[in-house]
């Protein structure tokens, strides 16, 4: 498979900018959607569109309120509670899903379900209740949350655009995720720095997969992989058909 046969630096040279641009372009479209709801540019709104607007508005208010508590450590800590940021993390999720080679292999081999501790038994890692394929935010939530509360945003579009660039979801094999857990945000302006630092490639799925919910897209991909195998398609050919690049 060409993309995974590249060295990590070759991958970044060839696809790094395009990967970031794709995330930013989709974040801009999501922010436009939030603004359109606020400005009543659409007569008919979907529940998802309205909820995105409400979540952005609420978070904007929280960020503004937080400024009144500068110097009060207990109050500032309260404004950083996980519950305050989580709705934005999921409702302003970047539309582009990403996936690693390990997760694609598991899907191809029809081994994408179950607990990692049983599947990867004997490799020396501790998985707890982790699934075989882990669904995680590429940009560390704690860093994104802290930076959002520390910044000032002129309007809802700016806030939604900022957040949607940092709510990138990646599907990762559990044994790859073990390595990611030890990787910190070394470059907060590089959305993919944790992956790059350990030379783990995560690539965008093709746009046709973005329409599926984050809880169902893996099953859809597994079914597609099974169909491809029946038709004699190779793993590499199948990967080329499901990734963006």
Image (cartoon, rainbow, N blue to C red):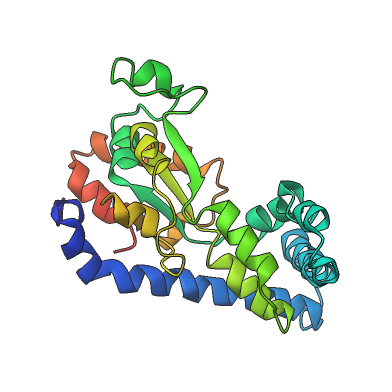
Which is more toward the observer, 179 or 173? 179
Q: Which residue is drawn at 71% across and 74% down?
A: 34
Q: Does residue 92 appear in the picture of this structure? A: yes
Which is more toward the observer, 115 or 110? 115
Q: Relative to 43, is 167 above or below?
A: above
> In the figure, residue 67 lies in which quadrant?
bottom right
Q: Does residue 205 appear in the picture of this structure? A: no
Place of residue 53 in the rendered image (x, y in percent of width and height, measured from the top left): 76, 68
> In the figure, residue 155 lies in which quadrant?
bottom right
- How many marks the image carries: the answer is 0
Q: Residue at x 28, y 37 (%)?
A: 105
Rendered-image quadrant of the C terminus: bottom left
Which is more toward the observer, 245 or 69? 69
Place of residue 124 in the rendered image (x, y in percent of width and height, measured from the top left): 31, 20
Relative to 100, 170 lies left or right: right
Q: Which residue is drawn at 77% across and 79% down?
A: 42
Q: Residue furthest front?
A: 71
Relative to 150, 67 lies left or right: right
Relative to 50, 199 lies left or right: left
Place of residue 64 in the rendered image (x, y in percent of width and height, measured from the top left): 81, 72
């Amino acid at each position: 498979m060409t993309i995974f046969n590249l060295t990590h630096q070759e991958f970044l040279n060839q696809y790094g900018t395009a990967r970031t641009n794709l995330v930013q372009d989709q974040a801009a479209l999501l922010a436009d959607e939030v603004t359109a709801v606020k400005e009543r540019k659409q007569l008919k709104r979907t529940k998802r569109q309205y909820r995105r607007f409400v979540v952005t508005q609420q978070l904007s208010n929280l960020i503004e309120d937080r400024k009144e508590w500068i110097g009060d450590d207990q109050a500032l800590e309260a404004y950083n509670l996980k519950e305050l940021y989580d709705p934005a993390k999921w409702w302003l999720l970047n539309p582009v899903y990403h996936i690693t080679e390990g997760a694609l292999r598991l899907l191809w081999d029809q081994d994408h379900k179950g607990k990692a501790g049983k599947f990867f038994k004997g490799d020396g890692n501790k998985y707890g209740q982790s699934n075989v394929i882990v669904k995680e935010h590429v940009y560390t939530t704690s860093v994104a949350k802290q930076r959002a509360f520390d910044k000032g945003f002129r309007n809802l579009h700016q806030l939604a655009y900022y957040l949607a660039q940092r709510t990138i979801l990646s599907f990762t094999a559990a044994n790859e995720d073990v390595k990611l857990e030890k990787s910190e945000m070394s470059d907060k302006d590089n959305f993919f720095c944790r992956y790059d630092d350990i030379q783990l490639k995560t690539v965008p799925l093709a746009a046709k997969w973005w329409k599926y919910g984050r809880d169902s897209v893996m099953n859809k991909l597994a079914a597609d992989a099974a169909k491809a195998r029946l038709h004699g398609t190779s793993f590499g050919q199948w990967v080329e058909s499901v990734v963006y690049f």
